[in-house]
Amino acid sequence: MVNPTYEKLGSAPSMIRELFAYGLRRSAEVGPENVFDYSLGNPSIPAPQPVQQALLDVLHDTDPIQVHGYSMAGGFDGTRRAVAEDLTHRFGMTIRPEELFFTCGAAAALISVIRALTVSPDSEFVAIAPYFPEYLPFVESNGGKLVSVPADLDTFQISLDILEAHLTSHTQAVLVNSPNNPTGVVYSRQTLEGLAELLRRKSTQFGHPIYLIADEPYRELVYDGVEVPFLPTIYPNTLVCYSYSKSLSLPGERIGYVCVPSCVEGQADVLHAVAGAARSSGHVCPPTLVQLALQRCADARPDLAAYDANRRLLYRELTQMGYECIPPQGAFYLFVRVPDGDDVAFSQRAKLEHDLLVVPSTAFHCPGFLRLSYCVSHDMILRSLPAFRAIREKYQ
């Protein structure tokens, strides 16, 4: 006998992972230069030089027993202190080390927060579609209910009127991801201030706080000077879930954190609940080596020149072909409207006829679009353009 909930989750297909696996097989068959894989959001630039140097320095000058030993459950004091100082300096809001709980990436951070806030089988978590597919198993596997609310399909900002209609007395939190995966859109300050006002009003109406869960692995990946507001400065009841996977090109190191600022209502209880949820799910003692390195380079930032060049090239070429694309402001994704609205069929045709791997937006609970991850080589984009052109011509 096995747990049926987890058996269902484990056997459920992932469109993204299946496309990526297909690409690996096809690359072995026809050569990687003939496969155009836009499926996976895997950083394609190296970690910033200060980060690489910090990792080497830790290995060189730190006791190996410490480097490869356990950390404290929620991270080393020195790591939390360095990151808290960086956040305080950048966002003008005092963040204390004890308000940070380090985790094995943003997934563990989100799971810990969701588990901590699920108080009954009726607990609801609202996500703005399109959204990261794993939100659904993160919520359901911890006994809650995920409520999907469509974004404004013209701007992909949050449609506050539609969101309000989905908030109930069972709403525990609203999940927001900005810069957004899969659209590349950054929620504007105006949108976020409207969201904050709505959540304050509904919290008063329902007699309990509605938390905002800020899923922020792409916070530093923005272009053209676009602002990414630090959400606790706009809405006090915000829990920040962060990962260094994208910003510092460290997905394999599995390092992130939950930030529960002092402005959060019942902050001590919430932080204890997050720590307890992490402990109960085994998401404690995150990797030591990268924690020790972060103490030395918490202020490191990515060089986005390569991503920006890819973004501009792909957006320009596809729009000239007649594709309708959402202008990407952040992350490394381009969201493309499918000419006839059938994203699954388009993805399948691209895969089988051209070895062009693009993710149907049905995977993100918003059909009719395609997600293209442009964290790839510039040369691959150039080589893939004839395939995009050939498919587009079939819809004319």
Image (spheres, rainbow, N blue to C red):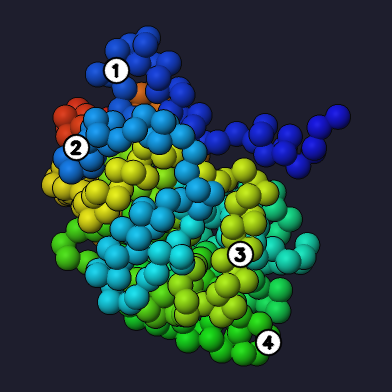
Q: Could you give the CA–CA distance between mark 1 and mark 4, rounded to whole angstroms?
A: 57 Å
Under tag 4, what secondary structure?
loop
Residue under numbered circle 4: 207
Of marks 4 and 3, which one's residue comes earlier in the chain?
Answer: 4
Residue 364 or residue 51, whichever sits in front: 51
- Considering the image in quadrants, where does the N terminus appear? top right
Q: Is residue 112 above or below residue 6?
A: below
Nearer to us: label 4 or label 2: 2
Residue 275 or residue 4, whichever sits in front: 275
Circle number at residue 53: 2
Along the horizontal axis of the image, is 126 left or right of 303? right
Label 3: few (<14), some or many (≥20) within 10 Å? few
Q: Could you give the CA–CA distance between mark 4 and mark 3, rounded to whole angstroms?
A: 22 Å
Rendering quarter of residue 277: bottom right
Circle number at residue 111: none
Whole-percent x and y of residue 188? Answer: 32, 73
Label 4: few (<14), some or many (≥20) within 10 Å? few
Q: What amino acid does circle 4 point to?
A: Gly
Q: What amino acid does circle 1 point to?
A: Pro
